[in-house]
Amino acid sequence: MIKVGIVGYGNLGRGVTLAVDMAKDMECVGIFTRRDPESINPVVNFPVYSMDKLQSFKGEIDVLLLCGGSATDLPKNTANLLKDFNTVDSFDTHAKIPEYYDSLEKVAKENGTLSAISIGWDPGVFSIARMLFGAVLPNGKDYTFWGKGVSQGHSDAIRRIDGVKNAIQYTIPKEQALESVRAGENPTLTTREKHMRECFVAVEDGADKERIEKEIKEMPNYFADYDTIVNFVSEEEVKEMQQKLSHGGFVFRSGNTTDKNSHLLELSLKLDSNPEFTGSVLTAYGRAVARLSKEGKTGVVTVFDVPLKYLSPMDEKDLIKNLL
């Protein structure tokens, strides 16, 4: 039985809790939170502890599933947790992944631990598709579209702006760009030409809306490269939108094997719940990290490093018999 700890209990933490509960080969040692544990009412009856208690579980947890945000939480806290525990996280700031990788590699090696980073559907599942599609169709071009749907990382980044009470952000692919790729036109598209971002923001009384809108639209790695719409709404409206955290997207590889034969490879996801699906991916990689750690693997890994068979609760003979 793989023993896991869940760190953080927001939307992603809830999704991970549901996924761990469905995994017959996993046992949740506890949910660890910076909030008052008494204030947490988990969707599954797992024990809840203060983060201050985590250290006392050293040696009892095979892997921690980290459910913090990419803007500040993961860069600030993962390295410290990695000193004593194996970890899996969903760090999704694409431009900063190499830097994040380097910041954890030395810590993991020095402490004999293992960290799987940037695990989710993008980065994550879509990363595998881009690599696979490019390997089998080298003469081609990649295209990735996200949405329409709620981006948890971008929503979290807005909520951290001074004066913001709550916020939700929708990523929306531009139809003209999507149609051009599907038609096999192999367009050259800028970031701005592929997507737009629409934000719904509730602010504190007296907050400077002009400043907040400017901070959102100029935020590097999140909004600066996109056409961004900012709508100021009530907190009740934001909470209503947060009841349905749907998302999805597409990965394409368009190219040729000869002058006469062209091909279009496509992977699509349509998700009713972004955090529940992301939580399921994190949980599968938690299984893989626990297995790899028992084999003596240390350091930092990404989806490119983990054999797919390590993700499955099925043994190798059943995988070959049923899925090959």
Image (cartoon, grey):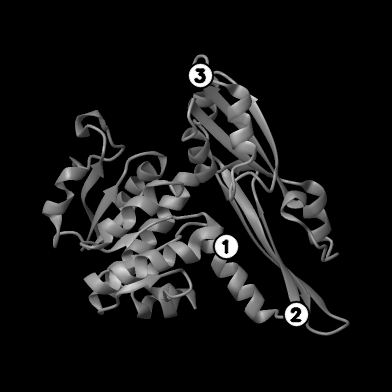
293 w.r.t. 210: above or below? below
Give whichever of discs 1 and 3 has the lower sequence position. Answer: 1
Is residue 314 visible to the viewer in this orientation of the structure? no
Residue appearing at x 14%, y 59% in the figure: 58
As drawn, is 31 to the left or to the right of 222? left
- Find disc 2 in the rendering and name its residue: 139
Residue 322: x, y in percent? Answer: 45, 74
- Find disc 3 in the rendering and name its residue: 236
Q: Say which amino acid is labelled 3.
A: Glu
Q: Say which amino acid is labelled 2.
A: Asn
CA neighbours of label 2 inside 10 A, class few (<14), some (14 to 19), many (20+): some
- Find disc 1 in the rendering and name its residue: 126
Q: Nearer the viewer, residue 230 or 148?
A: 230
As drawn, is 4 to the left or to the right of 205? left
Q: Residues at badges 3 and 2 in contact (C-beta under 8 Å)?
A: no
Q: Secondary structure at mark 2?
A: loop
Q: Residues at badges 2 and 1 in contact (C-beta under 8 Å)?
A: no
